[in-house]
Amino acid sequence: MIRSAICEMLGITYPVFQGGMAWIADGKLAAAVSEGGGLGIIASGNAPGAYVREQIRIARGLTDKPIGVNIMLMSPYADDVAKVVLEEKVDVVTTGAGNPSKYMKDWLAAGIRVIPVVASVALAKLMTRLGASALIAEGGESGGHVGELTTMVLVPQIVDTTSLPVIAAGGIADGRGMAAAFMLGAQGVQMGTRFLSAVECSIHPVYKEKILKANDLCTMVTGKRLGHPVRSLRTPFARAYQKAEYGGMPDEELEALGTGALRLAVQEGDNERGCFLAGQIAAMVKQEQPAADIVREVCEQAEPILMGASKWVK
Ligand code: TUI
């Protein structure tokens, strides 16, 4: 059984977080992961506070285990969602795509555990000083909004920077990835793409099928020119966006091209206009499974690998 400080801290069985995927990670998926012993996380994405409150209540109707909410800090509703998590007294808040400093005091005063995604050593230092409970070190192998550094490079540097437990994210889909993350000093992992194939994940069947059929080179990064690099499946939309990006389309038009594309992928499965966010490990996701089985399987795979690591030392 793999256990770490993060399990005791949060009252979870397995040190596995489910990533807060915008438009995807709803109350139903988060509850299934938490019921399975991991930490289920509801994504706020670009949704208003009322939506997040509804999803928190749905999750609470399905499980009494700890639940997290991810706040996407680039969202126009970030302030609104920051208030909702206070009012609903969620167990854990994770943040992404920015610096959550301005919210930390209020969240901590309410007894909420704050676990920010950090993509740099500088932010890790600041978050440690401001009272975060742990840090998520997310490398650019992940789907969605990506930082500069890879997981292999980022995790040990964050571990060296902080005394807090570090959760590794980006490029982890099985026990090998989990074991490797622990070898780099992490005390837990966060997976997003792997949970796209969860039975309880309500994405459009076309999206699920694309993940199950993905190959090793199936993702690409677009959006660098506007300062929001995003990793997604290499679809007609992603190729057209890249062409526009490097073909000199004005910023406002480019921004408009991307608007609504996540929803079109998740809800409509729209191959032409949808943006199907996915990490580089998409090809390693092979079957639909209950979320609880994913959590348990990854930990059970990692166990013998970590136990056997001594074979390399003569
Ligand atoms: O946030 C994510 N992944 C996301 S957010 C998202 S929604 C979106 N939609 C359209 C355009 C852009 C995003 C889809 N996927 N992951 C966590 C993450 N956070 N990755 C990288 C970072 C990050 C980057 C810089 C966190 C902090 C940061 O520092 C900012 C600062 O001010 O220091």
Image (tube, helix red, strand yellow):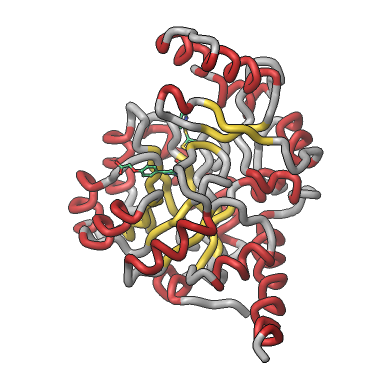
* Quarter of the rendering containing residue 108: bottom left
Q: Quadrant of the N terminus?
A: bottom right
List x then y, in percent, for residue 98. 34, 40
Q: Is residue 203 visible?
A: yes
Which of the four quarters of the rendered structure image does ligand 1 lie in?
top left
List x then y, in percent, for residue 237. 64, 18
Q: Left or right: where does residue 109 sit relative to residue 267?
A: left
List x then y, in percent, for residue 289. 75, 53
Residue displayed at 49% across by 57% down: 153
Return the residue nearer the eye: 64 or 36: 36
The residue positioned farthest toward the front in the image shown:
314
Residue displayed at 44% across by 46% down: 56
Return the residue nearer the eye: 53 or 14: 14
List x then y, in percent, for residue 178. 61, 65
Q: Left or right: where does residue 295 sit relative to residue 21?
A: right
* Quarter of the rendering containing residue 278: top right
Residue displayed at 45% across by 15% down: 255
Above or below, 296 against 209 in this view is below
Q: Is residue 61 visible?
A: no
The residue positioned farthest toward the bottom in the image shown:
314
Return the residue nearer the eye: 79 or 191: 191
Residue displayed at 52% across by 55% down: 151
